[in-house]
Image (tube, rainbow, N blue to C red):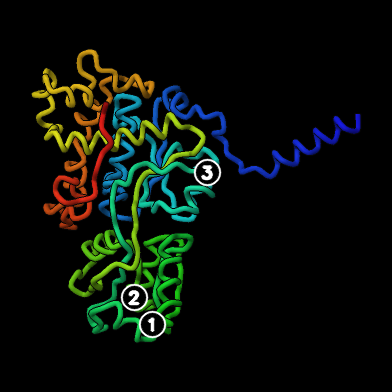
Amino acid sequence: MKRIFLIIWLALVWAATQPAIAQSDGRIVQRIMDRGELICGVNTVLPGFGAQNDAGDFIGFDTDICRAVAAAILGDANAIAFRSLTGAERPTALASGEVDMISRNTTWTLSRDTEWGATFGPTTFYDGQGIMVKTEFGVSTIDGLTEESITICANAGSTTELNITDLINSAAADWILTTFPDTDAGMDAYRAGACDAITSDISALISRKATSADPAAHVILPGAISKEPLGPVSPQNDANFADIIRWVVWGLLTAEEFGIDSMNIGDFMDSDDAGIGRLLGLGDNVAGDYLGINDQFMVDVITQMGNYAEIFDRNLGPDTIFGLERGLNALWTDGGLMYAAPFR
C-alpha cells in the first residue's frame, strides 16, 4: 500500500509541475469546427498589421492570415473571433486555450519555440528591429545615437527589449531603457518627450511614422539590429492544426507563384497543370484530405482572401500609407525569402 501511495503521490507532484495547457487533448481543429469559429490572438494597436477601423472591424496583414486559416477550416473567412493581446499576454493566452492561434507580429525564437509550448508556422513577414528618433534630434545613424545619453522606449516582454539591451551592453551606450506593456503606451511616452527614441520592428516603426500627425518629424535610422522572422503560432500539442496553418501560408505563396488570385481563380478551375490541380484540389487530387479538411480548401482561401501578394499589398503595399516594398518578403523567384514547400 505504501508503494501505491508513493506512486500516486509522485504522479500528482509530476502533474502539478507541468505547464497548464488547456488544449492538451490536441483536438483544436475539431473544437473549431464544433464552435463554428476560429479564435485568433492579434495586435489591435499596430496599423497595417493588426488594428480596428472606425466600424470596429479588425483589419491588417496579420488578421488576414487568421482569416485565411478560418476559410481553410470552416470555408468562411469571417467565421472568426479576435482576441486583443499584448506582447506579454501571448504565452499565457496560447497555453490556457484562450486562443486557438496567434497571428500578432511574433518573432520565432528558440526560447519561445520551447518554453511557450508553441509551434511556429512559416514566416509570413521577414523584418528587423530598428530605432526611430525625432528629426530635430539631429542623429542620422545608430552608431551616432550610441554616442548620446538618451532614454529609449521599448515593449516589455518582447524580443525588442532583449535586443536593445544587447545593443546597449555591447556598445556600452549611456542609455536608459524604459519599457511599456504595448506599442501605444510606448509611442505616447515617445511623443510626450519621455523618451528620446523608440525601438521596435522596422515595419512597426514605419506604421507609427506613417500614421503620426507629422511623419516628417520622425526619422527611422538606417539599418537593423536584429533578425525578426514573424509568423503565426499555435499550441505544440496539435500537429494537425499546425499543419493546416503551415499549408495555408504555403498555399498563399504557391498561388502567387502560379499567378492565381481572387479575381482570376475561376479561370484555373479546369486547369490541366498538375501543380495547380494539387494546390486547388481539382479532380482526383486530395490536398485537404491529408489535413482532414476540404480538398479545395485553398479555393476557399484564395477566393475570399486572395494570394500572399494581395494580402500584403492591400494592407502594407505601395498604394497604402505605409508604402512598403516587398523586399525580403518577395517570392524566392524575385530575389526574396518567400519559398513554399511543394503541394505534392
Q: Which residue lies under the disc numbered 2?
A: 197
| Left or right: where 292 falls relative to 267 | right
Q: Residue at x 39, y 86 (%)?
A: 149
Q: Which amino acid, by three-letter code, is at mark 2?
A: Ala
Nearer to us: label 3 or label 1: 3
Cβ atoms at labels 1 and 2 below 8 Å apart: yes
Nearer to us: label 2 or label 3: 3
Q: Which amino acid, by three-letter code, is at mark 1?
A: Ile
Q: Residues within 10 Å of mark 3 (few under 14, many from 20)?
A: some
Q: Residues within 10 Å of mark 1 (few under 14, many from 20)?
A: some
Q: Residue at x 43, y 82 (%)?
A: 172
Q: Which residue lies under the disc numbered 1?
A: 150
Q: Residue at x 35, y 86 (%)?
A: 148
Q: Is residue 143 above or below residue 166?
A: below
Q: Which amino acid, by three-letter code, is at mark 3?
A: Gly
Q: Is residue 260 visible?
A: yes
Extreme top residue here? 284
Residue 316 pos. (x, y %): 20, 52
Give the distance between the C-alpha atoms of the residues marked 1 and 2, in whole angstroms. Answer: 8 Å
**In terms of depth relative to the viewer, which is nearer, 81 or 253?**
253
| Left or right: where 210 falls relative to 124 | left
N-terminal-most mark, 2 or 3? 3
Q: Which residue lies under the disc numbered 3?
A: 117
| Quadrant housing residue 202 | bottom left
Q: Quadrant of the N terminus?
A: top right
Q: Residue at x 42, y 63 (%)?
A: 155
